[in-house]
Amino acid sequence: MSLRPNTLPAGNDSNASAAKRSPGRAVGWTVAVLAAGCAAFAAYAVTYPERMPLAIGTIVEDITGANPQPVQLLIPPPAPLSAVAQLGRNIFYDASLSASGKQSCASCHSPEHAYGPPNNLAVQLGGPHMTEAGYRPPPSLAYLYRQAPFSIGPDASDMDTAPVTLQQAAASAADVQRAVKTAGVAPAAPAMVPQGGLFWDGRASTLQDQAIGPLTNPVEMANPSVADVARKLENAPYLDQFKKLFGDSIVNRPGMLVEEAMFAVGRYQFEDASFHQFTSKYDYWLQGHARLTQAELRGLRLFNDPDKANCAGCHLSKPTLDRLPPLFTDTQYEALGVPRNRNLPLNKDPKFYDMGVCGPFRSDVKDLTQYCGMFLTPTLRNVATRHVFFHNGVYHDLKQVMDFYNLRNTQPEKIYPRDASGKVQKYNDLPRQYQANIDSADAPLDRKFGDQPAMTDQDIQDIIAFVKTLSDGYKE
């Protein structure tokens, strides 16, 4: 792009001729032209602020869609799987380990769907006859290789000090005001909310623990006991792999056999590059190898804008200081107040509430009621490939998700149902005594009833266009 500010209009324009004859008049004429140009540019900026570059120095890069500040990301290099991980791969795809004989880890965490659910069901079917509805939509197993164990508060600096219990950590933070999450700023202080862990409620701290859970869950793989799982492993075609790795005596210790099997599954998830590919268009753009479209650039700006979408307040979009690629999650927990999914079998009971961190599927934090209604912030990588969103699967496309954030407070009648009297039942999936936990401080959820929504429909379409750049498998 060439602005060519010193080029005068062609032809017999009298002002141009006069400028040539008189240096003084030339200066005045040039100033007038520049002033008019600046005024026009300012008017355009006011009318179309989303089209303006972040800085003058990035005009060319923004117009072309290139990243003005590319970075070389530190991505785990591909390597052959260890023997333990190869064993874990066999176990991951083994449906014979379920009571039905039809369900493996890959059934709910499909590699063809970014290790998320393979369909648009709100919850998956399992159980002995594959007829039992699950409790929550399966989260993706991708991009968990840097997930820390569940905790509340910072790690202890003195390793010889007795660890602080969750109850002690929560009590110390009980009277501290929650830090507001803002895009472009460091995540909220870890003492304010829980962080880390696996599952929607963080009840598993390692990939091994996460893999064990579904084996005996009555609505998933539905084995009556760990001993039943061990007997199936003893008859598996890969038993010799076990013996080579852990010794022949492993078959005489059923508990240890299952533990080692799920350790192997965890190693497979950690080592296999397909679980953390970093091959999205955004990854290539960060490194200067791809160009974003104008819609994607506008979506990125809105995603990071602390006064607009503010998505990056929780879904961190920038590489770390040591050049690790962003995971698009701060791994913390939020109470968002999504509407109740009345189609879930569990929700047929009007007294049942899924309150995330404080129950009902974990019990160690049930008394820390300041966390009721909080669920883990998932990664947005590959989120455009999903068909089910939030912990209860209430939404089935990204437009619905964005409308929720945009209209929850400003036009709640478009988000929540009405009761028999016509009153909007806002926050209808959390008991009233815990609704103060719901986030109303972070944009765009800080708007009030009747306010202008933070995003226009065009903004939402642009954000969705950007989010689609987070899907793996982009071809340069």
Image: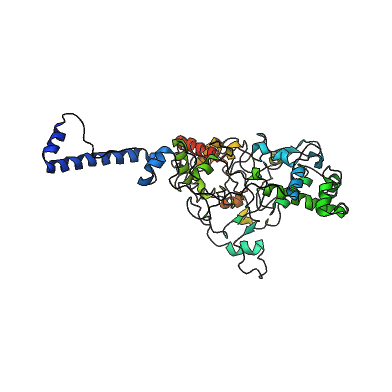
Q: Residue at x 64, y 46 (%)?
A: 78
Q: Nearer the viewer, residue 51 or 324?
A: 324
Furthest residue to the top? 11
Q: Is residue 25 visible?
A: yes
Q: Is residue 50 visible?
A: no
Q: Residue 73 appears at what percent x and percent y?
A: 54, 49
Q: Nearer the viewer, residue 118 or 390?
A: 118
114, above or below 145, in the image? above
Q: Residue 43 appears at what percent x and percent y?
A: 30, 39
Q: Residue 177 appears at what percent x and percent y?
A: 52, 59
109, above or below 161, in the image? above
Q: In which quadrant is the N terminus drawn?
A: top left
Instruction: Classify residue 371 by image quadrant.
Output: bottom right
**Left or right, residue 236 beside residue 363:** right
Q: Residue at x 80, y 50 (%)?
A: 258
Image label count: 0
266, above or below 459, in the image? below
Q: Residue 335 appears at what percent x and percent y?
A: 58, 49
Tell me how the rendering is colored.
rainbow
**Left or right, residue 29 beside residue 134:** left
**Left or right, residue 405 beside residue 429:** left
Instruction: Classify residue 39 by image quadrant.
Output: top left
Furthest residue to the left? 21
